[in-house]
Structure formats: C-alpha cells, structure tokens
Image (cartoon, helix red, strand yellow):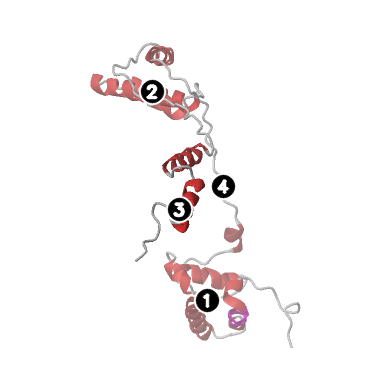
Amino acid sequence: MEYNTTRNHLEIREYGRHIQKMIEHLLTIEDRERRQKQAYVVIELMGVLNPHLKNVEDFRHKLWDHLFLISNFKLDVDSPYPIPTPEKLRAKPDPLPYPKRYPRYSHLGKNLELVIDKALSEEDAAKRQGFANAIAYYMKLAYNNWHKDTIHDDAIQSELNSITKGQLEFTNTPYVKAYRPQPERERGGYGRQQRGKFQQRGGGGNGGRNDGRNDKRGGGKFGKKRY
C-alpha cells in the first residue's frame, strides 16, 4: 500500500494523482509518435475532468501549459502553442508604477484641478463659462459634504479667483441642498400619546369596561330582558 507521505509531490492538485501518473508514464515512452498521440489523449482527459476551464479564454492553451508544468518541463512533445519554460513561469511581473499626484488644493482633489486646467485652455467662450459653472457647483458641493453651515457664493467666487487668478467666473448660482440635522424624536413619546388618547376614548380605561360588565350582570340599564 502506498501512502501520501511516500509519494512524490502533486504539481497541480486539481488534476489528481492519476493524471500525474499518466504524464509520468508519457516520459517513459520512447517512440515519439506514440508519445505524441498519448499526450493528446491526456489533454482530452484533463479537459473532461475540469469542465470549468472551458469557460476560460484559450482553455486548451492552459491545458497544454499544465501538461508541461506537471511533467516538470521534461516532456518532449510538439505543442500547438508556445512551450512554456520554467524561467518564464517563475518570472515576477514588473511592479506597477504608483501614480504620484500632488494636488495644490487637497480639499478639492486632483481631478478638479485637471478640470480647471481644461477650462483655462478652452477657447470657446460658451464652453468656458459652462466649465466655470460646473466647477463652482462642485466646489460648493464639496464644502457642504464636510461642513454643516452653508457657504455663500461670494466665498466660492473668491476661492475660484485665487485658484484661477481671476480667469474664471461663474454666472449662475450653484444650488446645493444644505445639511440640516434632524431633531431627535423622544423615544416612547408616540406610544404614550396614543395610549392616553385611547384611554380618553374608552371612557376611563379599564374601569369603564368593568362598570359595563357589572351593569350587564347586575341587570342595570342594559339588563337581560325577561319574558
């Protein structure tokens, strides 16, 4: 009996031990033509055992890469795709350059600075004015996101003048809904009001209902009629 501790390492566990043994058997076949045919058979079996790979783009290319990987790149067969190498497989990708953006006005962000540069380079007067109105609206919106008090349009225009050195001026009044904190509702107040209201309508609460019962039992105003 073989134990896993005495077996060799599984290169790709998703294919299992039997696929790896078949590929190891391919390494022992000396006839190249026969080895090539058996390699195609193993590829088909690998696709059947892993049907989810069919949804992957170029899944057959991936199967052939796995075939060479399981054989530790020792299998000598012809592949319809470029044969991978250990150096290419273990090569690390180049690090992605992190964008270094240093906005001049941190509270407005770098994107608004790019929009302002775009507006300053615009030659059409109508588009330039539209840029100015949109920039003023965003500046007021950004201010209201972080402050509870409303900001006057003169303050927006003053800051826009300092940023653009007086080259942009908005014409319309940017309307942004101001933040108004809602008053906290007293917990349980609604229920107490309703209970008090129902007590008044009931004519004294439980006492009124008990009096009605006593009248019925005692033959009061609405006593049982006798024949």
User: Helix, strand, or loop for circle 3?
Assistant: helix
**At 42% from the left edge and 13% from the top edge, which residue is drawn?**
155
Lower position in the chain sequence, tag 1 or tag 4 = 1
Lower position in the chain sequence, tag 3 or tag 4 = 4
Check disc 4 and give the amino acid type: Asp
**At 52% from the left edge and 67% from the top edge, which residue is drawn?**
83
Few, some or many residues within 10 Å of mark 3 (<14, 14–19, 20+): few
Q: Say whether residue 19 is magenta.
A: yes
Q: Nearer the viewer, mark 1 or mark 4?
A: 4
Residue at label 1? 77
Check disc 1 and give the amino acid type: Val
Residue 137 quadrant: top left
Q: Is residue 223 above or below residue 63?
A: above
Is 8 or 86 nearer to us in this picture?
8
Left or right of 21 in this view: 133: left
Residue at label 3? 215
Residue at label 2? 116
Stretch in magenta: 17-24
Check disc 3 and give the amino acid type: Asp
Distance (Cα) linking label 2 and label 4: 34 Å
Check disc 2 and give the amino acid type: Ile
Q: Is residue 218 above or below residue 141?
A: below
Q: Nearer the viewer, mark 2 or mark 4?
A: 2
Few, some or many residues within 10 Å of mark 1 (<14, 14–19, 20+): some
Lower position in the chain sequence, tag 2 or tag 4 = 4
Question: Which of the image's four quarters has the N terminus?
Answer: bottom right
